[in-house]
Amino acid sequence: MSFEKSFLYWSERGLVTTFFLDLMQYLNPAILVKFISLIDFETSLHINPEAIKRFDIIIEPGFSNTGFGHPDAVFYITFHDNKKYIFILEAKQGKYLNSSTDNSSRNIEKYNSSLNGQLELNYCLSLALSNFKLGDTILVEPEWILKTPYNDDRKGKLRCLKDAKVIKNVIPCLSSEPLENYFHVILTSDNENPLKLNNTKGKLPQLFTKEIINDELKTIDIWKRMKKRHYGWVNYIKLLSFVKHYEKDYFLGSFFNKTFELNNPGKNVNTNKRPSSLLNNKPINTSSIFKNDRGICLIYVPSIAKNTFLHFSWGNSKGDKDACAIRNFLSETQNPLRKYTTTEIEKIVKQIFFVDIKLSVDKVMEWKKIIIEYNKKYLQN
């Protein structure tokens, strides 16, 4: 009898993890340099493979919610002269613009979850790491941070990491290098490098520092200076092509290929489409929403399911607009619930989303992924 198995990972972290699992199966200095060359830096990094002594990767290091967050990965190259290049990676399944927010909203709580917010936080992390000295018990950003627009988020309190285990076991591997040896990488589903586009104005990170100009200490934004060499981009398609090129050398098989198929980054969900008029904790005027004879959307009806959006389809081939089916793709079975009418749902629905894809109801894994994303974004506080 045949026996099949699979080992899959979810979300951006899953994609990052499985890529590096694949990479480590056949890694050598020459292949490592080829991987680094996939990353689009404005000024290319030139690394001699013969100078490389070792490569290390840490997935989702914990730098504290009140410190520097949880980058998706930090990887670093150690050279024979003991110099290090340290790369801090952030990944989003969508495109840069959809994953970023206007940098004028820095004082909003979830700003640091946006991609440009994470890049700013990682810049401050690299400042703290560069200044860290052996024997220090706290990783903390420079005092002058509080005299820059970053203080809109800090509110007079420096971000720092005090976790003794992380300070002892992780920080020494990443610290005490010159700031020029820290690099920042974003992984998105864009087709071209979004950091080079003109339409990202207002959603690019701002990298503040203090410099003496005309004998006066001033706060300036050095993004344009830093991005040339220290900020790079890669997309999932490039990683997939890279993995497939070396697939024959995997002794465990590719983890990334199947995880890519499962997550299908950038294809399924248009999470940027959020019609505010349909998001309420009060009854919604649905007379225009369900005006078509047939349709499909995601609904949130807490009286039916408190913790998830539901797949809702209404109308049938006989022209009965009141006929409908509700499916909970996160339940063990996806048997449609048909005891309600469209008119009844109109009276109790709290949130409605129309999803910009054509996907049949038998695509359970795809619908499950979409609904998990909407639950995460709009139902979890």
Image: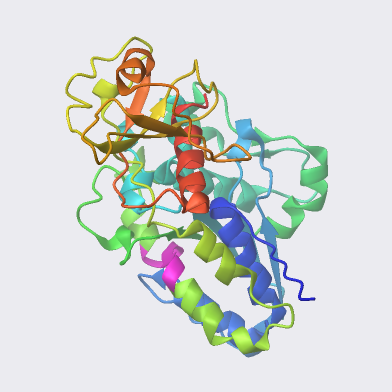
**Residue 146 located left or right of residue 269:** right
**Residue 66 located left or right of residue 170:** left
Q: Nearer the viewer, residue 163 or 285?
A: 285
Q: Residue 332's quadrant in the figure?
A: top right
Residue 149 place in picture, x, y as percent = 38, 31
**Residue 195 located left or right of residue 263:** left
Q: Is residue 139 magenta?
A: no
The residue at 69%/58% (across/down) is 58
Which colour assignment does the render follow?
Answer: rainbow
Residue 14 place in picture, x, y as percent = 60, 56
Q: Is residue 2 above or below residue 293?
A: below
The residue at 54%/21% (across/down) is 306
Image quarter hosting the N terminus: bottom right
Q: Is residue 5 above or below residue 293?
A: below
Q: Nearer the viewer, residue 378 or 179?
A: 378
Magenta-highlighted residues: 228-237
**Residue 5 located left or right of residue 265:** right
Q: Is residue 235 magenta?
A: yes
Residue 180 place in picture, x, y as percent = 51, 63
Residue 379 visible in the picture: yes
Residue, far top: 282
Q: Residue 286's quadrant in the figure?
A: top left
